[in-house]
Amino acid sequence: MRIFYILFSIILLTGLQAKSQVRSPFSDPETNIVKFYPNPAISSITFDIEKNPNQTHYIQIFNFLGKKIYEVSVNSRTIVDLTNFPRGIYIFQLKEQNGQISVSGKFQVAK
């Protein structure tokens, strides 16, 4: 049974390719709302938000099981410390002040 879980994890991780830039499916493909780097990340990841710098946004980070593990308020740039994050794939959501999700994406923590 343990071999099954190991093989399933390997297949899942090799099948998912995290991208370094995320685009909203409803926006112009030339316009990036969020850039994040490096990906895969080791100790920290930087989020650059290029959407209305005067408006406050929130970044929520979820583990691959869907549990929210981090939330921070950002204006244009923020650096998230990943030292307490275990190795794996994480999902982030950029939310506006009214709670609407602008962008979501994924990144990988490789330690």
Image (cartoon, rainbow, N blue to C red):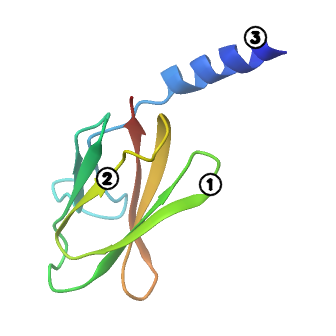
At label 1, counting other C-alpha atoms closer than 10 Å, the crowd grade (few under 14, some 14-19, many 20 or more) is: few
Residue contact at pointers 2 and 3, CB within 8 angstroms? no
Give residue 76's quadrant in the image.
bottom left
Name the residue: 58% across, 18% down.
Answer: 10
Residue type indicated by callout 3? Ile
Location of residue 32 in the rendering, given as x and y in whole percent from the top left corner: 20, 57
- The numbered mark at residue 81 is 2
Q: Nearer the viewer, residue 110 or 107?
A: 110
Q: Nearer the viewer, residue 86 or 51?
A: 86
Q: Secondary structure at mark 2?
A: strand
Q: Which residue is under mark 3?
A: 3
- Indicate which disc, 3 or 1, sits on the residue closer to the N terminus: 3
Name the residue: 75% across, 11% down.
Answer: 3
Name the residue: 62% across, 57% down.
Answer: 67
Q: Residue furthest right?
A: 1
Q: Which residue is under mark 1?
A: 66
